[in-house]
Image (cartoon, coloured by chain):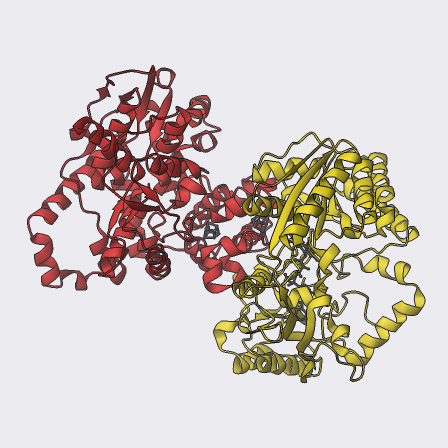
Chain colours: A yellow, B red
Amino acid sequence: MNQIEATFIQSLKEILPPDRVLTSAEDIVPYSFDGTAALKQRPGAVVFPLTAEEVSECVKLARRNNVPVVTRGSGTGLSGGSVPLSGCLVICLVKMDKLIEVDEKNLTLRAQSGVITKEIDDAAAKVGLFYPPDPGSMKISTIGGNVAENSGGLRGLKYGVTRDYVMGIEVVLPDGTLTFLGNKCVKDVAGYSMKDLFIGSEGTLGIITEVILKVLPRPKARKTMLALYDSMDAAAKTISAIIAAKIIPCTLEFLDRVTVQCVEDYAKIGLPTDVEALVLMETDGHPVVVEEEAAQMMALAKANGARDVRAAADEAEGAKLAAARRNAFSALARVRPTTILEDVTVPRSELATMVAFIDSVAKKHKLQIGTFGHLGDGNLHPTFLTNERDHEEMHRIEIALEEIVDETIRLGGTVTGEHGVGLAKKAFLKRQLGEGSYELMRNIKQALDPQGLLNPGKIFDPRN
Amino acid sequence: MPSANLLKSIDYSVLQQCMHCGMCLPTCPTYVETKLERNSPRGRISLMRAVADGELEVSKALSDEMYYCLGCLACQTACPAGVNYAELFETARAEVEQAQVNDGMQRGFWRWLSLNVIFMRPWLLRVIGRVLRIYQSTGLEKLMRKVHFFGLMPRSLAALEPQTPHISAQFSDDLIWPDEVPKQSRGYRVGLLTGCIQDLAFSNINRDTVDVLLANGCEVITPRSQSCCGSLHAHNGELELARELARRQIDSFDLDNVDAIITNAGGCGSHLKTYGHLLHDDPFYAAKAKQWDKKVKDIHEWLVQIRFRKPTAGAGVGEVTYHESCHLCHGQRVVSQPRQILNSIPGLVFKELPESNWCCGSAGIYNITQPEQSQKLLDRKVENLRQAGVPVVATSNPGCHLQIANGLRACGSHPCHQVTQPVTLLAQAYRAEQQA
Ligand SMILES: Cc1cc2nc3c(=O)[nH]c(=O)nc-3n(C[C@H](O)[C@H](O)[C@H](O)COP(=O)(O)OP(=O)(O)OC[C@H]3O[C@@H](n4cnc5c(N)ncnc54)[C@H](O)[C@@H]3O)c2cc1C
Ligand code: SF4
Ligand code: SF4
C-alpha cells in the first residue's frame, strides 16, 4: 500500500487540529468506498475542514507534496467519484454544514457545501419556499456532491436538475486559489459562465465550498397517484399520452416487477407484487390545476391500459409512496449480495424500446435485472442483481453491459443521466462523446489542473 | 471456547448485504453526533468486513468502536437492503471479547462479576435486589450520599449510583401466582416472562401485565425465579453464556401447552425472538428454539393480535406521549400497537413525541460504559419531551423508563413529570371499570 509521508501528515496537523486529521486504519477503512458496488481503495488520510480557507490550505499543501486529492461529500455517489486513490488525501466536507442564509427577497439560499440536501429544502420550506431537486439520497447526500454530480431527482421532468438551481459557487481551484463564480442575479453575461463548468465536474476541476441556490415558491398542492400495469408497453404509452396532452407532471417514476417486490418487502405499504410495471405519478401547483391534471392523468392511464389507478388519500400517503420509490435501489440489494446499477438515458420516445431491449439482454445472458427509473426524462436504472464473487457471472454482466451501452448510444442516449462518469462509466465515455468533445474535456482538465491533483483518473485517464 | 475468527466464520453474505448506500447514516445517533464514518452503521460494517477479509487486525480501537455503537438498531429499520445489523453487531462484540484486546483488570472484574456471576444466577440477583431495597429504604442511601462515599468510586460507577433503580417493595413472585385464571376465559393460555431488571425495579408492571392479560381472557402461567434472558450477554460479546441462558428459558416453559410467551420489556423481547438463530446448531435445542421464536410475543403485539377489549373507563390521565424503546420498534418492529393501546383508553389524549424512536441513551448498559454519549442522547430526549409539552410519557422497557425518569428528575422543572407504561395505563383503566 502506498503510504502517505509522515511529514505530510505532520504538516496537515499544523493546518487542522489533530482530531480532524484521520490516519489510523480503523478511522480510514470506512472511507474506502462510496455507494458504488465492488470499488474499494483505502486512502492515505482523511481530513475535515470547516472553512474554505482550510480547504485551500490543504490543497496547497497537497500540491507542494504532489499528493492527489479526492473530495468527498457523504459518499453516496454511484459512479465511484469519491472512491479514494491509494495514498491519496481525502478532503471530506460533511462538517462544512452551515446554512448561511435564506434570502426571501431574492429567492435564493446560501449554504456551505456539506449541508445535507434535505436540510436545504427543509430550510426553504420554513418560509414557504421550495428547493426542487430531490435525489433518492436526499436525506444524506450533500449539496456539494449534488452540484459536483449535477444530480437529478424524482421531480426532474417539471423542475429540471441541480444545474437549474445553481446561481453561484465558491470554489477552491487546484492551485489553492479561492474564488467565487456567479452571484444572486437572475441575469448575468459577464464573460464565460464559469460556474457551469464546475457543475457536474465530479471533483476533478475544483472543490466547491459554498453554493448560492435558486429557490421557488412552494407549490400549494400536490397529488400523488399510482398506476399499475400488466405490460411495460402500456405504461410507456401512458407517459406519451400524458405529455401529448400538454401536461408536465412533476413526477413520473417507474418500477418493474422485481423492483416492486423488493420495495414492498422493505416498506410494507401494500404495493401489489404481481404487476409488470408500477408508475408513480405526481402533479403539484395550484390546487385547482392539480385536481384537474390529476383527474386527466388518471383517465389517460386507464385509457392506455392501466389495470388499476388510484390516488393517495392525502399528502402523508403520497410522501410514503415517494419515499418507497427513493429506496428502490437499496431495496434491490435484498435479492443478491451485489447490486450493480446502471444509469442509461434515452430520448423519451425511445423508452419502451430500451426497456424491452434490457429485458431481452437479461434473458439472453441469463441475468437477473431489476429496472426502475425516471420515465418522464428517459432515465432508466437497470440494476444487475449478482454476486461479485461469482467471476463467471460478472463476466456475463460485462458483456450485457456493453450491449446495453451500444443500444443506448444507437438510440441517441447517454451512458449516464445523473450519476456521473467517475470510474464506473469511464470506459464508455469516448464511445459516446466522439473524439472531438472527449479531447476538449481533457484539454479543459489539463488547463485547470495541469498537475492532475484533483480526483485524477476519474471521468478519463490522465494524459501520459 | 472456540477461537476461530468469528467474523470470518459467519455467512459472508450477511456482511456483503451492506451495499454501502448510506441510507442508514441519518438515523444513526452516533454518526449524527460525530459525522465520522467509523461511527456509522456502514462504517462499522466495513470494519467488520475488513476483519473478515483479513485486512484489519482486531484491535483496541475496533473494540472501542463496537462499544461506542448503541446497538439501538435504528440502522436496521432504515436499511432498505435488509442488512441484519443485530447479528453483525453481536458477532463483532464477541470477536473483540475473544481477542481480549480490551482487558483492563477493572473492566475484566466488573464484566465477570455481572455477566458471569450475577446475571447467570437469578437467586443472587434477587438477593442483591433485597440488599439494595434495604439500603434504599433505611436511609443508608441518604447517609452514604451525604458523606460522599461515592466520590471514592471510579467516576463512571459513581455517576451511575443515582441511576440505580429503585427496588420494588415486592418481586414478581410475591405479586403473581404461578397460574392465574381469568374470570371469563377466551381459551388462551400464555406464559409470562418476568425479566430481571423489570422484576427488581418494576414488578408492579409485571402485575399490570398479568391483569391486562386476565382482563382479556388469557390464563397466565408464570414460572418462579426466572433467569435473565441473556440479551445482556449476547450484546456484550458473551454468546456462550447467552446460549446457556436461552436453554434455561426454553426449559422453564411447556411450549406445546401455551399459545404465546409474553414479554413486556422491549430489550428482552428483541433478543428472545432470536433464540432460533442463537441455538441453530444445538442438536437438542434447535427445533425447540425455533418453536420458541414463533411463540414469543411482545405484550402490545399480543393484545392487538387477539383484539384486546377497549376499556370503558379512563386511566386518570389526560395528555400522554410515547417514547419507543429501540428494541421494540427497531428490533421487533412493534410500532403501531402500543399507540393503539394508548388511543383505546377513554379520556387519554395521545400526542406524538418528536423523534419518538431516537435512542434515549439507556441502551442496555451503555449508560454505564459510555456515560458521555448516553448523557447527550438523554439531553436530546428530555428536550424533545419539553417540545411535546405533555405531562405523562409512556414507554415499555425498564432501561428507557429508568433513564428518562432520571433525566427528568435531574432537570428539576419540566412539563413532563410522570413516566409510565402503556400496559400500566391499560391496567388502570380496567381497574377503574370495576370501581365505576
Ligand atoms: C440510494 C441512492 C439513491 C440515489 N438517488 C439518486 C438520484 O435520484 N439522482 C441522482 O442524481 N443521484 C442519486 N444518487 C447518487 C448520489 O447520491 C448523488 O450523486 C449525490 O449527489 C452524491 O452526493 P454525496 O454528497 O454523497 O457525494 P459523494 O458521493 O461523496 O461525491 C460524489 C462526487 O462529487 C465529488 N464531490 C463531492 N463533494 C464535492 C465538492 N464539494 N466539491 C467538488 N466535488 C465534490 C466527489 O469527488 C465525487 O466525485 C443516489 C445514491 C444512492 C445511494
Ligand atoms: S446498512 Fe443498509 S442502509 Fe446502511 S449503508 Fe449498508 S445497505 Fe445501505
Ligand atoms: S445500532 Fe444504532 S448506534 Fe449502532 S450503528 Fe446502528 S444506528 Fe448506529
Most foreground residue, A395 or A410? A410
> For this view, does A336 lie left or right of residue B89?
right
Quarter holding residue A361: top right
B43 lies above or below B125? below
Image point 42% across, 26% down: which residue? B305
Image point 32% across, 18% down: which residue? B189
Image point 49% across, 75% down: which residue? A18
A422 lies above or below B310? below
Tell me the quarter of the image containing the N terminus of chain A.
bottom right
> For this view, does A339 lie left or right of residue B213?
right
Can you give x and y, in whole percent of width and height, for residue A277 in the image? 74, 37
Tell me the quarter of the image containing the C terminus of chain A.
bottom right
Can you give x and y, in whole percent of width and height, for residue A430 in the image? 88, 62
A77 lies above or below B253? below
Can you give x and y, in whole percent of width and height, for residue A446 in the image? 82, 77
Report if residue B316 is visible in the image.
yes
> For this view, does B24 lie left or right of residue A60?
left
Total label count? 0
Residue occupying the far front of the picture: A288
> For this view, does B294 lie left or right of residue A301?
left
Report if residue B241 is visible in the image.
no
Most foreground residue, A215 or A255? A215
Image point 56% across, 36% down: which residue? A268
Can you give x and y, in whole percent of width and height, for residue B362 in the image? 34, 51
B24 lies above or below A352? below
